[in-house]
Image (spheres, coloured by chain):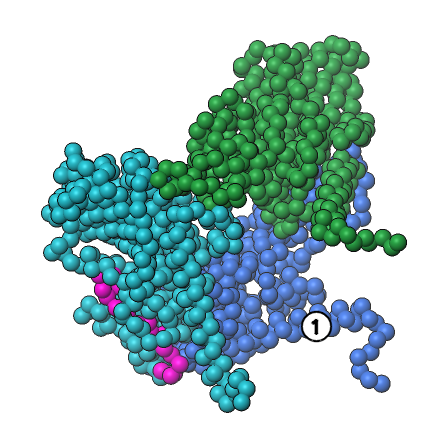
Chain colours: A green, B blue, C cyan
Amino acid sequence: MIGLRNIWYIAAWDYEVTERPVERIILEKSVVVFRAADGSASVLDNACPHRFAPLSRGRVIAGNIECAYHGLRFNSDGKCIHNPHPNGCGPIPPALCVRKYPVVERHCAIWVWMGDKVPDETLIPDYHYIDDTENYRTFRGVFELDSHYWLGCDNALDLTHVTYVHAGGLGGGADNVINERRELVRDGNSLWCKRYNDDIVAGPDFRRFNPALNDIKVDKQQNVRWDPPGNILIVILYTKANEPDACKTSVYAGNMLCPVSDTKTRFHWSVSRDFALDSDKLDDAMRAVTELALIKQDKAMIEDQLTLMGTIDIDELNPVYIQDDVLPLRAKMTLDAMIKTESQERVDEALNWRTPHISLTPA
Amino acid sequence: MIGLRNIWYIAAWDYEVTERPVERIILEKSVVVFRAADGSASVLDNACPHRFAPLSRGRVIAGNIECAYHGLRFNSDGKCIHNPHPNGCGPIPPALCVRKYPVVERHCAIWVWMGDKVPDETLIPDYHYIDDTENYRTFRGVFELDSHYWLGCDNALDLTHVTYVHAGGLGGGADNVINERRELVRDGNSLWCKRYNDDIVAGPDFRRFNPALNDIKVDKQQNVRWDPPGNILIVILYTKANEPDACKTSVYAGNMLCPVSDTKTRFHWSVSRDFALDSDKLDDAMRAVTELALIKQDKAMIEDQLTLMGTIDIDELNPVYIQDDVLPLRAKMTLDAMIKTESQERVDEALNWRTPHISLTPA
Amino acid sequence: MIGLRNIWYIAAWDYEVTERPVERIILEKSVVVFRAADGSASVLDNACPHRFAPLSRGRVIAGNIECAYHGLRFNSDGKCIHNPHPNGCGPIPPALCVRKYPVVERHCAIWVWMGDKVPDETLIPDYHYIDDTENYRTFRGVFELDSHYWLGCDNALDLTHVTYVHAGGLGGGADNVINERRELVRDGNSLWCKRYNDDIVAGPDFRRFNPALNDIKVDKQQNVRWDPPGNILIVILYTKANEPDACKTSVYAGNMLCPVSDTKTRFHWSVSRDFALDSDKLDDAMRAVTELALIKQDKAMIEDQLTLMGTIDIDELNPVYIQDDVLPLRAKMTLDAMIKTESQERVDEALNWRTPHISLTPA
């Protein structure tokens, strides 16, 4: 599938990976993710180069992964370091190795770099709310979306859907869409759409989550950040109307979409809050609302949308835009440009490398 | 898929459509069918032109349909009449509209015209038995056939299959196929195959349905009518042998096949009778026989047939014809010619429109 | 699919076919297999030439097969011998016949010849252990493998996988792969890989199957034979170390893979032994071990392997070979050459037949 490769993708939440290897498919490439005894995570091509058995069916022995088909062992650099045939210790052909992918474990997630260029850690988006357990309380999850990852981004980046898709729940309160001010802000690789709603009644869910919001008027911010290719942060911030330091109530919701294939997405999500930090009960209540919204309501809509579109690229269908599409449209234009640049650079490099002595510029 | 477009298809039985919108797929085009409060039915393209969410997931408000994704509302002509963004009442780009399809509700069915030409109501085939409740009693149903609709027509148009596929039930009595006279009659758009069997014993099912047929010899007619593209009427008429006014017992069975895709068909069926008009019990008995024949026996055969053929057009496989294939063959030749003509006319129109000043005929 | 056609395939075990016809798909061709009252088996094209209904839905009447759709009857040569339309006895067009395939019933299996050439019975591989009930006891089975048949052969032909895929069961005992001598032997159409292991402890499964192998050292042979295209015999033979006539314990395991399509295989298997010929209990114990190995462990590995490969031909992926691949590699080279020759001969014949008077060799 077409997609940005010189970028970080979440292959898994930290808790999903142990010494028992797991398969992940990212941009249609199957990789194996596992940890050594010291806890360090590795990501290798999943196909054993001998007979293409999935290394993810194997086991980790002293930090090396053993293929479950014929027992070949590969170290965390992807080099074969043991061939038991014949007689327990056979020769190792130099070609017997698999590709290793750069890995960074950050914000409780295992990020993997799928491209050929030198990995750049500054491109990992900031989700410090997740690992800053002193100031925030977080719960997380992941589910499979049977749709193209960009349709998931398109959904999350335009919060006007909340009133309709999540009617009665997150979307309750028609005041959500009255008298809003908006701004679009570019900040490095990030794009922000910020929406301000002053002197309103808080939505029913948030009044339930934090009773301090009952019986008062509030100022509300709903800020959505996009980082390429499929990383979204939704910040919802309530303060008492005209008293910006009173009744502060904020939620930081992460949606990190990892493209599996054109019709499958691994959807990682997190919800962090800065209030009621010790309430298990509130975790349960907020998790129920979140899972209903993401795994039932959004998932059904986005999957039906792909079926009806009959293509993976919504732009091919010549959609009619409305004003509130500004963030998803800007984000998609940015991403498309990045993918085009990356693809052009690969062509340039390849041509340069194959024909070093030929110049295309006239003397 | 290839199919006749300037013609009527049954999108649904009347009872299937309420204010709650439903999706129907006809010739691979997804449409939404719904009713206004006054009961009038509308059929529109199902894809909202904004983000291609299915309008069939939405709700009807005062005869207009609201998209469940972002709340855009379309009237029964397909024009957007409300955009809630931003702030409850946003601008409506002129392109924000969907295609409306001509609809006629007749014979308890919602007929939709899928072509570009002016709809012609005289092309709706006559199934007045269904709504003439004074003289007939009718029960109806619909099921999904995982096969090409023509294979379903091919089945219904050639009743010689009854003895074999419905052995023991509808097909009981070997006399069904002995000493028959046949004729093929063209009547406007309709094709009839009429079969006469005189002085025989009625089939076991009919003797059970109408005990007056027991203990007498009967004259039997089995007349099958085809109307393009997939509408069939099967008339079975018994009278006492040589007394054409005695013991009249007739059944009018409708099979109206709506092509969903090359491998899926929506099969509407009806059974009307002119005897025992007030018997619920007979409804149950006849429904059991009908559903066994259509939904178990025919369906299994027709689906296996498509799988084995490996193509949707039986003519590609060079079948060997026998005499009794005359009605399905004539019907298919007629339909193929109609589709070819329609396709040629579209080409002619398009060329004419795009190159108005160029004449292909030499001066 | 690509595959050898002038060769025998097992369509079914003998016990699978009665007068009730069954469908089998071999090299993507659907055939019907049935027996006459005298027990003789026939294999015909499954598609009735009239409307392409599957003859396998029909019934056998006096050795002829009746189509369940319109009642046409075909004899075991594939010729239509009865058309009931109209009036019980209609004309039979000469084209109304289906292809008959040569059949041989041997070693308790129904072998069918899928090619156009004269069938050669000497090409049926020797599995006499199955029907020699005086000297061997056999149990058999069949299952569907959702993978390419060659990946199943590749698995069975290289027994080094046993230690890993069947760890703890068949593969127990690391001595299985220490100090082995091997030889590759070509014997007519068959290829043998023979492995000798002297003065070792027998594997835990075999010590359980035959307690005589406990407490002694043994000499072991593991001989694997391949016959094109997908027929494998695995012979495991234990004798007391240095006493080749003592404690003889042998098992003859057949794996006969019939290619259904590129991604489906019908996997017939048999296990014959020359000891404990009257033990039902040992049947049960050995069947459990066999089914675990084949239907759970090997099947899962081979199916995952195909999914990960994303192609049906492993050679396209440029695998890295190790020494123990010798038998599967030689077998595949042999098979590929046979397929190429067969395909070339078809071209030559066709050209020769179509242009009999033109010579491509210069005068």
Q: Would you say residue C165 is visible in this rendering?
A: no
* Residue depicted at x 52% and y 86%: C359
Residue C347 image offset from top left, x and y in percent? 48, 76
In the picture as drawn, the residue positioned furthest to the right comes out as: A363
Q: Is residue B90 above or below residue A203?
A: below
Residue B125 image offset from top left, x and y in percent? 56, 67
Residue A43 image offset from top left, x and y in percent? 55, 33
* Residue depicted at x 74% and y 40%: A338
Quadrant of residue B302 within the rendered picture: bottom left
Q: In this figure, which residue is indicated by the disc labeled 1? A: B345
- The magenta region covers C92-111
Q: Is residue B65 above or below residue C231?
A: above
Residue C272 image offset from top left, x and y in percent? 20, 51
Magenta stretch encompasses residue C107: yes
Name the quadrant of the C terminus of chain B. bottom right
Quadrant of residue C118 within the rendered picture: bottom left
The 10 Å Cα crowd at callout 1, few under 14, some 14 to 19, many 20 or more, is few
Residue type at numbered disc 1: Glu
Q: Is residue C241 left or right of residue A270?
A: left
Q: Would you say residue C192 is visible in this rendering?
A: yes
Magenta stretch encompasses residue A205: no
> Which element type, helix, strand or loop, lies under badge 1?
helix
Q: Is residue A252 above or below residue A313?
A: above
Q: Is residue B102 left or right of residue A50?
A: right
* Residue depicted at x 62% and y 27%: A104
